[in-house]
């Protein structure tokens, strides 16, 4: 019989794990996985200028093939609580749906994989090994999470043969699509210095705004690439303009 992932999901959503605080979510998973016979490692990584991040790596078995599930338990801030129909960390159920911050991104898929992995372990239906790479640093700087856990996994001989990332993806309904890749992203900040002055004496000043406007126009109209058969071309979005 398949294990219902709902109780585990409810427990995870009740952990207010806003980046980078795991807020008990990794403790919940560690307890659950330890009881199934997984060997759990808690990995705390640091970097100057960034918050310390608690991560979890859990593995059952040492054989091949090795399937790893990668995910994150951190969530974005809930915003104005009065805008929520139900408290964001209450795991509220209504009309067959469960509501809460992180339900789809991505505590739901973590609960589903963990319970499915538990069923596989109990049934002894595989000869390889299962592992989980769970971080609390995906919605933030993403410096002390997956990247460093992967480096640790390589050092310790835990490189998987296959990896499943349970990020929510859909075309018509949640979970109806499997993707084999994802575009990357690059965020940057441009600062242009000027010389303060008076509008009556423009020759004594250096206004950086026209320079920045020209730069934005050039970037916005620049063709970075033409994409390929799997991905659309690169796009640019200017999100903030401060003077």
Image (cartoon, rainbow, N blue to C red):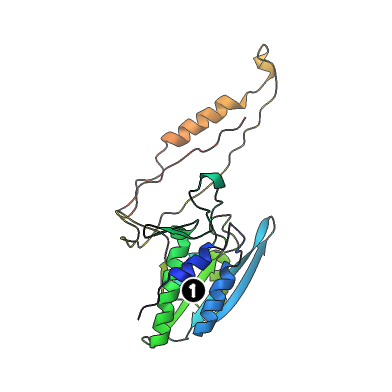
**Place of residue 90 in the rendered image (x, y in percent of width and height, measured from the top left):** 52, 59
Of helix, strand and loop, which one carries label 1? strand
Q: Is residue 145 left or right of residue 47?
A: left
Question: Residue at the location (68% across, 13% down)?
Answer: 201
| Residue at the spot 61% in from the left edge and 64% down from the top edge | 23
Which of 174 and 143 lies nearest the eye of the viewer? 174
| Screen quadrant of the C terminus | top right
41 above or below 37? above
Coordinates of residue 216 in the picture (x, y in percent): 50, 33
Which residue does the image show at 46% across and 61% down from the upper left?
106
Residue 184 in the image: state x and y as whole percent. Answer: 45, 54
Query: Which is more toward the observer, 221 or 134?
Result: 134
In the image, residue 203 above or below residue 52: above
Left or right: 199, with 94 as reference point: right
Q: Which residue is mark 1?
A: 132
| Residue 153 visible in the picture | no
Of all residues, the one furthest to the top in this rendering is 200
């Amino acid at each position: 019989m398949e294990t219902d992932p709902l109780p585990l999901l409810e427990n995870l959503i009740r952990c207010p794990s806003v980046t980078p605080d795991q807020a008990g979510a990794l403790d919940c998973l560690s307890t659950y996985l330890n009881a199934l016979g997984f060997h759990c490692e808690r990995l705390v990584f640091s970097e100057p200028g960034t918050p310390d991040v608690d991560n979890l790596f859990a593995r059952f078995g040492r054989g091949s093939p090795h399937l790893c599930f990668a995910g994150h338990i951190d969530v974005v801030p809930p915003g104005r609580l009065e805008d929520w129909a139900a408290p964001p960390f209450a795991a509220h159920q209504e009309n067959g749906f469960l509501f809460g911050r992180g339900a789809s991104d991505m505590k739901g898929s973590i609960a589903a994989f963990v319970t499915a992995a538990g069923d596989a372990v109990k049934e002894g239906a595989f000869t390889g090994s299962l592992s989980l790479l769970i971080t609390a640093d995906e919605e933030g700087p993403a410096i002390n999470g997956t990247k460093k856990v992967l480096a640790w996994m390589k050092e310790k001989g835990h490189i998987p043969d296959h990896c499943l990332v349970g990020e929510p993806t859909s075309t018509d309904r949640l979970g109806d699509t499997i993707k084999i890749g994802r575009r990357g992203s690059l965020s940057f900040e441009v600062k242009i210095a000027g010389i303060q002055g008076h509008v009556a004496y423009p020759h004594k000043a250096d206004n950086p705004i026209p320079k920045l406007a020209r730069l934005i126009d050039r970037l916005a109209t620049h063709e970075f690439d033409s994409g390929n058969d799997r991905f659309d071309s690169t796009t640019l979005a200017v999100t903030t303009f401060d003077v």
